[in-house]
Structures are given as C-alpha cells and as structure tokens.
Image (cartoon, grey):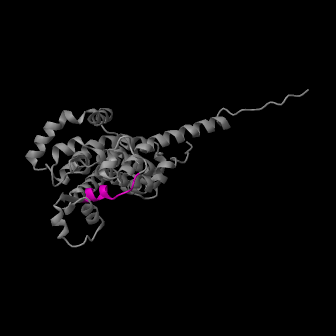
Amino acid sequence: MTSAICAHSVVEPSGRSKSIAGSLVVVYALLSMLPLFWIFLTAFKSPPDSIAYPPKVIFKPTMDGYCGLFSTISRQTPEYIASLPPPTSICDKVARARNMVVAGPSNFLPRFVNSLVIAFGSTALSVLLGVMAAYAFSRFRVPGKDDLLFFILSTRMMPPIAVAIPVYLMYRWLGLSDTRSGMILLYTAVNVSLSVWLLKGFIDEIPREYEEAALVDGYTRLQAFRKIVLPQAATGIVATAIFCLIFAWNEYAFAVLLTSGQAQTTPPFIPFIIGEGGQDWPAVAAATTLFLVPILGFTVLLRKNLLRGITFGAVRK
C-alpha cells in the first residue's frame, strides 16, 4: 500500500493564501482611494450639494468648483447683469446663473506654479547633493564618518517648529522671506539628510570592483561615478527623489511662516479659498484634485524604476 505524499513548499504560498492576500490588498486599496474619489466628486458639486446632509452621491454635475478656483466671482444686481453682453465662457455662464459675474482670475495658478518650481527645484538639488555626499561616505575614508552621518541624520529628527523662529529671523535678515530661492534652499537643507542616508545604502550595495575595472580601463573617478555608479543606483535615486518631492510638495508650516504673496505655495492657499458666505468647498476639492496630479504623474512616470528590483552582478573573490 502506497501513500501519496504531497510536498508543500515553504517559500511558495498556497492558492488560498494568495486569494486572502489579494482580497486584503483590494479592500485596502479601495478604502485608501475612497477619500480621493469623494474629493473628486465634490469638485463637481454645487456649493449646497457639497455640504448637504446626508451627503449626496447622486447629483447634477456643475463646474462651480473649478470656476470658483480659477476665477474671482462677485455678486451683482439683476439689473447690472441684464445690461451685460451674453456670457462667453463656462465660468461666465455659471456665475450668471447665480446672479454673479467673473471679476478676474484668482491667485491659484501663480501659487501652483510656485509649488512646482520650489518642490521640483529643491528635489533636484537635494538628490544632487545627496548622491555626491553618499558616494563620498561610501567610497572614501572620511574622518569621523560615523559622527558626521549621525549629525546629518539628527537634523531630520528635529521638529520644524523648534527652528521656526530662528529661521524666520535669519530669512528676514538675509532678505529671503517670501522668495522662491529661499524656500528651495530651506527644503533642500531639510531633505538632504534623508537623501544622503537613503542613497548611501544603495551605493554601498554596488560592488567596488565595477569602479576598479573602469579605473583600470582609463576612466577617471568622475567618469566611473557618472557611467558606472549612477546607472546602478538609478532605482535608489528615483525612490529618494519621490520621498523628497512628497515632503517639499506637501510642506505647510514653513510655507505659512515664510511666504505670504510672491512665493506662496498651494498648501497654505487652499484652506483660505473663500466663497460666498464662507468656505467654497467645491473649489477646495477642485484645488486638492489638481494638487494630486503632479505627484501622481511623477510617480507613474518613474514606476518602472520603483518596481524593478536592484540586480547587481555577483563578483567572486
């Protein structure tokens, strides 16, 4: 009598485990995306529908939110509105239906451009400085390297509110308050510690033999760094850039303290979008929806570098 023995791999999960894990991932994804989906819907609601209770899932879509975001609307008398020429744009039609007129553009677009310039500028500078510093710590004998690395990391531990007043006084004395360059330098100073620590871990995994072979072939140290190390560390650079961009894109405390007009970014601007009689929630939802687009687009464009594993050749000694 023979009995069949079914071998079960310890590494390979069973079909049931895969189904349970897949179901949990789907549920988690739906719960995570539900607030974003609700914000997207709110952007197409009218102001009364946006604050209705119970909340309305089925409603008549309008462009009130986006018109209130990109334009300044003021209430006028019916006689004045009747004397105006026919509306020429969607926002004109939306405003006329509410006995209002478009008085001019809003400040959202300049604030959005400030966010793009400051966030991407500080991210590029943080990654550039971080990859060079990480390479130096990884490849050269730096005196007091452990102490320096701990000091760099300690700057990330400090809460921003602890240095808010000194930074404000320093920026006012240097004339960097409410300037794009000042915000780029500040966000770079905050992000460079994260950049150094993340990238050092990736560069440590790159075998030194690759660079030594390049140096034997006649490459300079800089050429070996540019042609050997950077391509191998591409995944780490992309991941670091995304983390730095998320911080600079969402930062609120320093943006409120150090900017007020010329260099104000989108996060401090969104909560103060005021409509007729109070907060214009459809406009706030529209601004939030547009605010997600650059981060989402940046992540999608670089998803291949994030999803693929880092594969380094094995070197036998």
Q: Tell me where the magenta segment starts and ends, as one range.
A: 59-70
Looking at this view, name the residue that lies furthest to the bottom: 85
Observer able to see residue 65: yes
* Residue beneath the point at 16% across and 61% down: 77
Looking at this view, name the residue that lies furthest to the right: 1
Q: Is residue 173 above or below residue 6?
A: below
Q: Nearer the viewer, residue 233 or 275?
A: 275
Residue 176 shown left or right of residue 223 in the figure? left
Observer able to see residue 136: no
**Within the magenta stretch, is there residue 211?**
no
Q: Quadrant of residue 4?
A: top right
Quadrant including the N terminus: top right
Quadrant including the C terminus: top right
Residue 107 shown left or right of residue 59 in the figure? left
* Residue beneath the point at 54% across and 42% down: 26
Instruction: Estimate the x, y position of residue 205 in percent, counting from the top left.
Output: 46, 42
Q: Nearer the viewer, residue 101 or 133?
A: 101
* Residue beneath the point at 60% across and 36% down: 20
Q: Nearer the viewer, residue 181 or 27?
A: 27
Total count of labels: 0
Looking at this view, name the residue that lies furthest to the left: 173
Instruction: Estimate the x, y position of residue 52 in percent, counting from the top left.
Output: 34, 44
Q: Is residue 31 above or below residue 284?
A: above
Q: Quadrant of residue 258?
A: top left
Instruction: Estimate the x, y position of residue 213 in percent, counting from the top left.
Output: 48, 53
Looking at this view, name the residue that lies furthest to the top: 1
